[in-house]
Amino acid sequence: MEYDFRQIEPKWQSAWKNSNAYSVSNNSDKPKFYVLDMFPYPSGAGLHVGHPLGYIASDIYSRYKRLKGFNVLHPMGYDSFGLPAEQYALETGQHPAETTEKNIETFRAQLDKIGFCYDWSRELRTSDPKFYKWTQWIFLQLFNSYFCHTQKKALPISLLIEKYAAKGAIPKSGQPIAGKHFTAEQWNAWSKTEQEEVLMKRRLVFSAYGEVNWCEALGTVLANDEVVNGLSERGGHLVEKKKMRQWFLRITEYADRLLEGLETVEFSDAMKEMQKNWIGKSEGAEMSFEIKGSANQLKVYTTRPDTIFGVDFMVVAPEHALVSQITSEAQKSEIEAYLKYVKSRSERERLAEVKQITGCFTGAYAINPFDGKEIPIWIAEYVLAGYGTGAIMAVPCGDQRDFLFAKHFNIAITNIIGNHFNGVEANSTKEAILENSGFLNGMMMKDAIGVATTKMEEMGIGKRKINYRMRDAGFSRQRYWGEPFPIIWSDGIALPLDATELPLELPHVDKYSPGPDGEGPLANLSNWVNTASGNRETSTMPGYAGSSWYFLRYMDPHNNETFCDRKASDYWNQVDLYIGGTEHAVGHLLYSRMWTKVLFDLGLIGFEEPFKKLLNQGMIQGSSRFVYRVDALKIEDVREQKFSADFSPIFISEGIFKKLQSKEHFSDKINILAESLGKTHPFIEMAVHSRKLSLASLHVDVNIVEGVELNIPAFKKWKNGEYAAAEFILEEGKYICGSEVEKMSKSKYNTVNPDDLVVRYGADTFRMYEMFLGPVEQSKPWDTKGIEGVHRFLRKLWRLFYDDLKGKVWNEEKATDAELKILHRSIKKIEEDTERFSFNTAVSAFMICVNELADAKSNKREILEPLLILLVPYAPHIATELWNKLGNETALVDASYPVFESKYLVESVKVYPVSINGKLRTNIAIDLNAKQDEVEKIVIANEIVQKWLEGNLPKKIIFVKGKMVNVVV
RNA sequence: ACUCGGGUGGUGGAACUGGUAGACACGCAGGACUUAAAAUCCUGUUCGCAGUAAUGCGAGUGACGGUUCAAUUCCGUUCCCGAGUACCA
């Protein structure tokens, strides 16, 4: 009886499905555990071996936790709104809903074959109106909330309205600023439109003007992904920035809490670092400078107020509003020319050419408030209008960019840090003692920061200011395939729909082309857009809307009354383990963290960080294979570079290719080829005649290459026999392909489909092999060659139960201590490894265990039964089959994990290092079963100490920290 | 440039808080079984030197230093690879 996975696996997959083996209840006495995968976008390409890596890891952990007695929530769904389906619709006219449905079916079929334990009764899709009803509902909560700066949390906007009506908005201290502050009387006198305008500045989702990638030729707004080098990806048309009314998510209000929250979650340092960088908090000061001969002031932001006496010039962003006002008559034409130049450059160019120094003097001077020094004001593209105040004070001795700028334009450099500045490059130290710095002289820079800031505040010319790099996130897309906004515009006021009107379903459209003026396709539906109370918003929400809260919906997926019952979210609470790739480090993970915080602030859920622990799976790269084609040109075609079609294509093995490349002379190259083909081969004759050879390397399908050796018959059939007539120049009888590690993609023919491997080796082998490949968190190229080893292991396991010749071999005999030791060592090791997500070493532990049992010819139920339970998370099908064969009626998936008993694991001999009077002498092996004074049982591992011990037998051995041994002579 | 990872046999990778470096697997070599193949099993496999041999000696975790009785592990300097971010004031 052989291990027939082709029969076993489908059998148990359908059994699990029919018995709802994996459905999970919200009512249980067991402790809860929530394991979540980042849900996939169901693309048309289906799964490749990289996708299931994280899914297998989460499946193993879920099954393990379940065996350990937890009530485990392990759901799966689809992030099914998105651009590719819409683009496909544009090209083919097929409705995105249909494409999506079809793709989901493919995904599901592929996932099912791997034997995952998802609770499919909780499946969700972000494009399902039953789901996006609640995405829209949460949008309304955001719309109707504001961030209170005193309580540092979201509150209903109605509270703000009450406050405005009663007290207005008046600063606690200082003068009210027109346009920002107002009294209750003013508020109450304002029109609805005026009031709404003020409220819009506080709502957590708000509408404002923002820049988009506008492509005139296509008449549409493009995503960053669709813009390549300033041109549209489709058609290569010019793309420019255009201001349009957009929705935004006011995530900046949560910057501090997003930073603080990082301290409470288990993310990798790399991940936390990325989020911190993205938020980009910097503490500094904002400071105003008088401008000579002008009523205007120049406001700059700096993190180093201590360097104020080292300021040699100011730089203002070219787009800065002040530029036109302060430019002197003399500099006017030069400034205009420079502005024209900056305008001509795309943002991409400005970012790419970091080394290039450009700028222009405005002719104006700012006054240093401390020493009255006149500081020239320049404009330069390296200062960005969008960050800080759009103006900086430049300190060339302390900042490398400022230094290069000063050198380039011959601006004299003031040195305030003595010999810390060498005149060749700037030094940004904070450890120098200040010189040439007026009242700061003699102070350590890091101490001077506070002193200088305080002085500025006293003088009323500056104040402490915290800046963030992060901007509010754009929340609208001029697209069809997304959630429609529950908003109607009436006289410029955004009116939210009532919750009872949700879901606002996506209407059917006949064509997916953009609407007028860059609006989305929905704008073409005048019947839908025009309502009695106004016009509907025609843009849709971005892909991250649904994914920002989907993990909550799994807890209560069929609830029609609320997005997630508070009882359900209190029970399941945070996601205990979230597994996914690093590509979502700053997008999805920040947005979902923010939404969770808002829902928490509004009292809708009881926790404010969605993910307790995050495990990042590594990318599985493709390992591409190449074949090398050599061509000759016909003499008459040399000019047109046309390849000859008179003979079959010739492919040369990698070694030959390298040899050809290394030769410079044409005749040498020809000789190498003629060696194998013969001088009279038509190809050689042609090449000799035209004196032209061309070498090309082509991607070849990795699935027809064994290691690096090309399967020639398969290659001839590949691409419908395009190379059926090909000739090959081999080395040592083999065609060796070139190889390279690249991203896995269809066009590189380096994708490996899990289905093929499952058909060939079975799901259990596939699961264990993906884990065996290396640590989950590490990126690595896919390589199928080791899969045989894992498959061999499962067959070996099977033979502990059934022998091909003898049939059933397992028995009911009593296990020996040696056998129990093998078992319990495995329980310990596999449990520890699974707990710390070291799945690759756990697989090794299984192999060692089975090898040892096979060597010892142990086929006892007492040993095998617990072993099968250990195996369930890794290879559920074979484990269940054998469990069943042992005559067990109960379902294995609910068995309880075997308990490790240390009594079986007492090592009899162990090597310890030995120190004498604190100095190490050598390592000795000690019989742990022996009493410590039975010195004859001490096995000497090292000869030197043996000699030493012969003369002076130790009287006492003292264990220190369980490891170190101290011998007292 | 900055931040975070990582450099270990022919290959993927082990070594969990410093304690016999190379587990486990692939590959390779040799052998058994077989008419043969597949499958399976056994032996060897870090490198160098010596030996018929068991074995012995020496080197060895990117490089150079340091701490320690002891370093793949801790510290410093440096080189290389990967990921992320970027004129952020």
Image: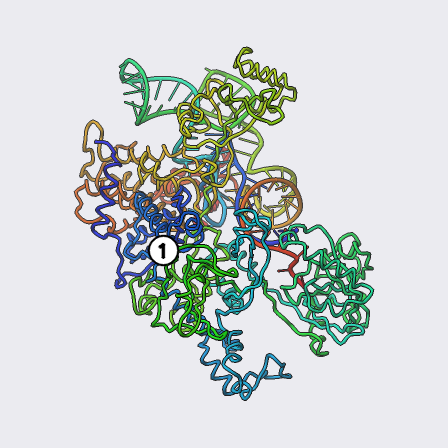
Quarter of the view holding residue A97 = bottom left
From the viewer's perspective, tell me whether residue A376 is left or right of residue A735. right
Viewer-closest of B15 and A938: B15
In the image, residue A947 lies at what x, y percent? 49, 33
In the image, residue A6 lies at what x, y percent? 26, 36
Quarter of the view holding residue A279 = bottom right
Q: Which residue is mark 1?
A: A35
In the image, residue A951 lies at what x, y percent? 48, 36
Mark yes or no: residue A958 visible. Answer: no
Quarter holding the N terminus of chain A is top left
Q: Is residue A784 above or below residue A221?
A: above
From the viewer's perspective, tell me whether residue A239 is left or right of residue A370. left
Q: Which chain's residue wears label 1?
A: A
Viewer-closest of A419 and A547: A547
Mark yes or no: residue A394 visible. Answer: yes
Dot 1, how many residues are within 10 Å of its Cα: few (below 14), some (14-19), or many (20+)? many
For this orientation, the residue located farthest to the front is A526
From the viewer's perspective, tell me whether residue B80 is left or right of residue A817. right
Viewer-closest of A24 and B50: A24
Which structural element holds mark 1? strand
Quarter of the view holding residue A285 = bottom right
| Residue type, numbered disc 1 | Val
Q: Is residue A727 above or below residue A821?
A: above
In the image, residue A404 lies at what x, y percent? 75, 54
